Image (cartoon, helix red, strand yellow):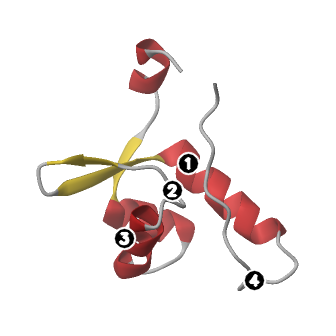
Amino acid sequence: MNVSQEVNMKQMTVKQAAALYGCSHANMIVLIHTGRIPATRIGHLWIVLEEHVLALREARDARSQPNAWIEPVREAA
């Protein structure tokens, strides 16, 4: 992914990402810390890309077992 593509992606706070994914702020932090969703730390804030949240949500919704392991989001090469 090049810089111009990344600039056009919507960046979100953890609170916004959690609301979009449908979980708590704390659970989104766990997803970030366990590497299941990529995030960038800027100062004390974590920034998540909307496309990563949507990809993770789609993967979750496609699972036959809702509590099964969540695979990490893979960035496009």
Name the residue beneath numbered marker 4: 66
Q: In terms of sequence position, does the residue under pointer 4 or pointer 2 come before the other?
A: 2
Residue 29 position in % (x across, y down): 36, 70
Residue 61 position in % (x across, y down): 76, 69
Residue 71 as seen in the image, left or right of residue 52: right
User: Is disc 1 placed on a helix, strand or loop?
Assistant: helix
Name the residue beneath numbered marker 1: 52
Residues at marks 1 and 3, CA–CA distance in whole angstroms: 14 Å
Residues at marks 4 and 3, CA–CA distance in whole angstroms: 19 Å
What residue is drawn where x is 72% and y is 69%?
60
* Three-letter amino acid code at the position of disc 4: Pro
Residue reaching furthest to the right: 64
Q: In terms of sequence position, does the residue under pointer 4 or pointer 3 come before the other?
A: 3
What residue is drawn where x is 46% and y is 32%?
9
| Contact? badges 1 and 2 (CB < 8 Å) | yes
| Contact? badges 1 and 3 (CB < 8 Å) | no
Residue 69 as seen in the image, left or right of residue 48: right
User: Quadrant of the image for the N terminus?
Assistant: top right
Residues at marks 3 and 2, CA–CA distance in whole angstroms: 9 Å
Name the residue beneath numbered marker 3: 29
What residue is drawn where x is 59% and y is 37%?
75
Q: In which quarter of the image is residue 17?
A: bottom left
* Three-letter amino acid code at the position of disc 1: His
Residue 76 position in % (x across, y down): 64, 30
Name the residue beneath numbered marker 2: 37
